[in-house]
Image (spheres, rainbow, N blue to C red):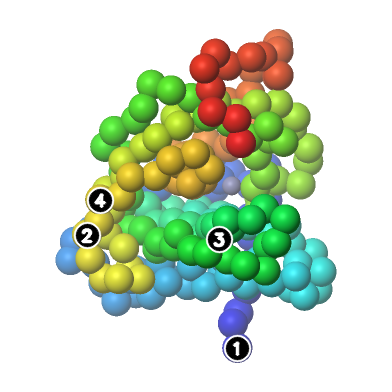
Amino acid sequence: MFEAKPILQDGNKLLRKKSKKVKKPYSQEDRDFAKYLHDYLAFTQKPENIEKYNLRAGVGPAAPQLGVLKRICAIGIENFNDENDKEKVTSVTSFAFINPKIISYAQRKAYIIAGEGCLSITEEHKGYVPRAAFVTVQGYDALTEQELTVKLRGYEAIVIQHELDHLEGILFYDHIDKEDPFKKIPGALEI
Ligand SMILES: [Zn+2]
């Protein structure tokens, strides 16, 4: 039975702390924790759990959201060919990263028109969150047990940047322009 530990909520000081790099060789405990975060994600995406535990469907918890200040985070994104038929998942982008880092960014920006969400934030923060439209990420993936270098674009790139921000103590609304939350971002990819 999966044990869903509580997700820390905005206002908790741990969410604003910088996470520490995980020491190599990665211990079984750290690798298991990365996989736990990935399982957590699957758990938060199940409609029955969303209702039962009052969750917001997540795209990936980062370790600090569970009070662990280590550079570990998971992402899991289902891809659909047909946006109107979400039963037909064509592929899943899944990682359970230890020590992920972005090694290159595109100059071009991307943002989610409807704004970003976060398992740690219930309060609504309206506005665009500008991110890089393409990123290359390097890190150890506990799911496949290997060091990976992956290129992510669009929504996936946004998600990993959101997660890596958690490891720096940054929350998505920190990026919203306070004066003009819906300021046009020239040339940006809209999602
Ligand atoms: Zn978040």
Could you tell me if the residues under marks 4 and 2 are in contact, i.e. CB atoms within 8 Å?
Answer: yes
Locate the C terminus and report the quarter of the image it occupies.
Answer: top right
Question: Above or below — where is 153 with respect to 97?
Answer: above
**Mark-to-mark CA distance, 4 and 2:** 7 Å
Residue 44 seen in the current view: no
Residue 7 placement, left or right of 73? right
**Mark-to-mark CA distance, 3 and 1:** 23 Å
**Mark-to-mark CA distance, 2 and 3:** 22 Å
Residue on which the image places disc 3: 78
Residue on which the image places disc 2: 147
Question: Above or below — where is 2 with respect to 5?
Answer: below
Q: In the image as oriented, which residue stretches furthest toward the bottom?
A: 1
Q: How many marks?
A: 4
Residue on which the image places disc 1: 1
Crowding near pointer 4: few (<14 within 10 Å), some, many (20+)?
A: some
Crowding near pointer 2: few (<14 within 10 Å), some, many (20+)?
A: some
Residue 100 seen in the current view: yes
The first of marks 3 and 1 along the sequence is 1
Residue type at mark 1 is Met
**Mark-to-mark CA distance, 3 and 4:** 20 Å
Give the image location of residue 126, x and y in percent: 75, 29
Residue on which the image places disc 4: 149
**Mark-to-mark CA distance, 4 and 1:** 33 Å
As helix, strand or loop, the secondary structure at mark 1 comes to: loop
Give the image location of residue 190, x and y in percent: 60, 30
As helix, strand or loop, the secondary structure at mark 2 comes to: strand
Residue type at mark 4 is Thr
The first of marks 4 and 1 along the sequence is 1
As helix, strand or loop, the secondary structure at mark 4 comes to: strand
**Mark-to-mark CA distance, 2 and 1:** 29 Å
Give the image location of residue 159, x and y in percent: 51, 45
Disc 4 versus disc 2: nearer the observer: 4
